[in-house]
Image (cartoon, coloured by chain):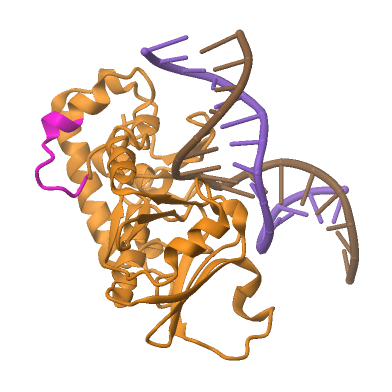
Chain colours: A orange, B purple, C brown
Amino acid sequence: MPELPEVETMVRDLGAVRGARIETARVLRPDVLKNVTPRTLVRRLTGATVRAVSRRAKNAVLHLDDRYLVIQPGMTGSFSIAPRQRHRRPDEEGEAYIVLRLSLADGRALAYRDVRRLGRMYLLPPAGYAAFSDRIGPEPLDPSLTAEAFAEAVRSSRQAIKKVLMDQRRLAGVGNIYANEALFAAGLDPSAPADRLDVEDYRRLLAAVRRILQAAIDAEGTTLRDYRTGSGQPGNFQFDLLVYGREGQPCRVCGTRLAATHAIDARVTVFCHRCQR
DNA sequence: ACGAGGTCCTGCGAGC
DNA sequence: TGCTCGCAGGACCTCG
């Protein structure tokens, strides 16, 4: 489930196509396209050069000559870069799940696949991309984000802190796995109303979010099932998870049996009754 | 304005 | 062994 570290890893691997010219484009799963028809997308991509690749929140962004191709991998989206193959069997290597295939002028092919197709793709002009980015909260790893600004963005809500932490309009890039981990690391009860925490809590929480996201990037992400890096490898952070996926097992810090609930935002929350209050 | 809950989508694992 | 069913969940949507 690509969150910030997984998308960051994909984007770093996608850096390998920077400067490449797109020779042909094919859309195989048009329902993933949200604001553009397959025909228009193909027309815009053909002959364009990938000027840069970047990440915003959980989105990968290909900067083309005068457009931005924004890809939200959703739950199961992934990229692969490979030498172009002349003969492919239709069934081979998840071929059925390919959403978009780009043939590059240098002989390589860039494929984007998404098994469940909960991901989305947008083609945006510069002003549209600016508006898109403005709707998303600050990047947690941006050093200019202060604990005070973070607290300000989050504290106005009476919702559970875990739900607020995952709200992309307030903070970019944190999803269910890293929210669970960060709240554990910060010693905060996931169900605590956001407006009940003080600035010191938010200072600890932001530090925990940053430490965990950075460690996950260093490990090239968390692979539980579908996620793969741009080179097709699984990540390694699943071995470092302290709470997510460990319900019923002993807390690594105090030995208490970890609890799980679906009460917050209908997503699994795993936590330690003793360490998180 | 805000919050709760439904929707999309498919593979997988639990249970019978 | 083979089937059905429910779950996984990010972002967007509607409804109250």
Residue occupying the point 17% across, 38% down: A204
Q: Point out residue A258 in the picture as x, y percentages from the top left corner.
A: 44, 43
A146 inside magenta stretch = yes
Q: In this view of the protein, which residue sits in the foreground, A107 or A236?
A: A107
Q: In this view of the protein, which residue sits in the foreground, A58 or A220?
A: A58
Quarter assignment of residue A131: top left
Residue occupying the point 51% across, 40% down: A268
Main secondary structure type of the part rendered in magenta: loop
For the C terminus of chain A, the quadrant is top left
Residue occupying the point 39% across, 83% down: A105
Q: Which residues are magenta?
A: A140-150
In this view, A179 is above or below A23: above
Residue A116 in sight in this render = no
Task: Left or right? Give the position of A180 relative to A74.
Answer: left
Q: In this view of the protein, which residue sits in the foreground, A133 or A205?
A: A133
Residue occupying the point 26% across, 53% down: A212
